[in-house]
Image (cartoon, grey):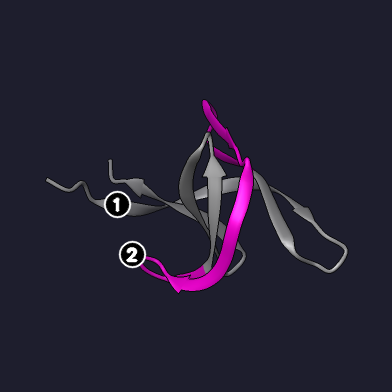
Amino acid sequence: MKREREKKYVTVDVRFSEDGRLRPLQIVFDAEHIYEIDRVKDVCRRAADVGGVGDRYTCLIHGKERYLWFEKGKWFVEAFAQ
């Protein structure tokens, strides 16, 4: 059975380049779970499965591809529903 996902807003540490591009460095999921981003593979405008449209960052975290979304000035991930 496939588990439901939900939009989970997160804190993201970012670096701005001289030309204004965002580079996410780490995701703070909660006080106990902080994930460093090894590399950003791609950025594109997409609709999220959990609703909304934003910039989807395809990130490499501990060797695994994960999506990080930037929508209306806020960051979120598609997390498993509680």
Residue for point 45% across, 52% down: 77
- Find disc 2 in the rendering and name its residue: 49
Residue 54 vs 28, above or below: the answer is: below
Q: What element carries label 2?
A: loop
- Find disc 1 in the rendering and name its residue: 5
Q: Nearer the viewer, residue 48 or 10?
A: 48
Residue for point 63% across, 40% down: 38
* Image quarter in which the C terminus is found: top left
Of callouts 1 and 2, the N-terminal one: 1
Are the residues flagged by discs 1 and 2 in contact, CB closer than 8 Å?
Answer: yes
Residue 31 on image: x %, y %:
54, 29
Mark 2 surroundings: few (<14), some (14-19) or many (≥20) residues within 10 A: few
Residue 9 vs 17, above or below: the answer is: above
Residue 76 vs 73, above or below: the answer is: above
Question: What is the span of residues highlighted in magenta in the rendered image?
Answer: 26-54
Residue 58 on image: x %, y %:
53, 56
| Circle 2: residue type | Asp
* Image quarter in which the N terminus is found: top left
